[in-house]
Image (cartoon, rainbow, N blue to C red):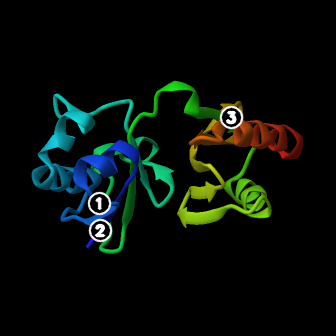
C-alpha cells in the first residue's frame, strides 16, 4: 500500500507522521488521505486542483513535473507531503547543473541523514530537493534541481548549500 509522509502542520493536523493510503494515482491517494483527515482538504485542494503552495514529492520528485495528480503509484510508493512554510525559516531556489547525487554528497559530508528520497535532516534544518525540467537552449540540456531548506538553522545551511552549489556545479 502506498505511504504518505506528513511534515510540519500536516503532521499536526493528522496527529501522525506517516499514513498508508489507497490509490493507484497521486490524486486518488490524496483523496483517500483527505477522506480520513477532512481538515487536510482545504489545505491541499481548491476546486479539485492541488494548491500551488503545497509540495508533493514521489520518491523525491515533484509530482508537478511528472503527471501531476494523475501520476501512477506502485504498491510500495512513498509520497512526501510538505505544507508551505512562512517567515524567515525557509529558503529555496532552483540550481542549474547541480545534480541530486552531488547535493547528496555535500549533505552526507556535512553530517546529513537521509529521511526519504530527496529529503535530508541536518542539525536544525531539513533539506528537500527534486529535479525540475532541464533548461533547454537549442540542443543543449542543462539539468536543474529545486532545493528548499527549512528549520531553525535554515539560513546558515542555505548559505552553505548555495556556496557549494556555485563552486561545485550549481
Q: Please determine whether, in this image, residue 18 is positioned above or below residue 149.
A: below
Percent from the top left, x then y, of residue 112? 68, 61
Quadrant of the rendered image containing residue 122: bottom right
What residue is rendered at 34% in x and 43% in y?
9
Residue 147 in sight:
yes
Give the residue pinned by disc 3.
155
Q: Earlier in the sequence, mark 1 or mark 3?
A: 1
Q: Earlier in the sequence, mark 2 or mark 3?
A: 2
Q: Please state if 17 lies on the left or on the right of 150 as rendered.
A: left
Q: Which structural element holds mark 3?
A: helix
Percent from the top left, x then y, of residue 45? 22, 35
Quick check: marks 1 and 3 in contact, CB under 8 Å?
no
Percent from the top left, x then y, of residue 66? 42, 48
Q: Which residue occupies the extreme top position in the image? A: 87
What residue is rendered at 56% in x and 42% in y?
151
Around disc 2, counting alpha carbons within 10 Å, would you say few (fewer than 14), some (14 to 19), or many (20 or more)? some
Q: Closer to the observer: label 2 or label 3?
A: 3
Quadrant of the rendered image containing residue 123: bottom right
Percent from the top left, x then y, of residue 110? 78, 58
Give the residue pinned by disc 1.
16
Q: Which mark is residue 2?
A: 2
Q: Please state if 71 lies on the left or on the right of 127 as rendered.
A: left
Quick check: marks 1 and 2 in contact, CB under 8 Å?
no
Q: Which mark is residue 153?
A: none
Between the C-alphas of marks 1 and 2, the distance is: 16 Å
What residue is rendered at 70% in x and 38% in y?
158
Amino acid at each position: 500500500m502506498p505511504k504518505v509522509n506528513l511534515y510540519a502542520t500536516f503532521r499536526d493536523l493528522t496527529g501522525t507522521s506517516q499514513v498508508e493510503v489507497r490509490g493507484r494515482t497521486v490524486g486518488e491517494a490524496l483523496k483517500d488521505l483527505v477522506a480520513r483527515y477532512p481538515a487536510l482538504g482545504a489545505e491541499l485542494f481548491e476546486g479539485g486542483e492541488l494548491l500551488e503552495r503545497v509540495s508533493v514529492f514521489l520518491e523525491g520528485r515533484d509530482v508537478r513535473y511528472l503527471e501531476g495528480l494523475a501520476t501512477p503509484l506502485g504498491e510500495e510508493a512513498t509520497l512526501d507531503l510538505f505544507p508551505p512554510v512562512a517567515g524567515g525559516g525557509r529558503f529555496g531556489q532552483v540550481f542549474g547543473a547541480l545534480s541530486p547525487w552531488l547535493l547528496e554528497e555535500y549533505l552526507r559530508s556535512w553530517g546529513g541523514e537521509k529521511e526519504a528520497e530527496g529529503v535530508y535532516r541536518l542539525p536544525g534544518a531539513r533539506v528537500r530537493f527534486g529535479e525540475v525540467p532541464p533548461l533547454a537552449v537549442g540542443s543543449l540540456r542543462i539539468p536543474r534541481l529545486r532545493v528548499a531548506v527549512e528549520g531553525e538553522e535554515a539560513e546558515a545551511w542555505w548559505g552553505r548549500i548555495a556556496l557549494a552549489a556555485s563552486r561545485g556545479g550549481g
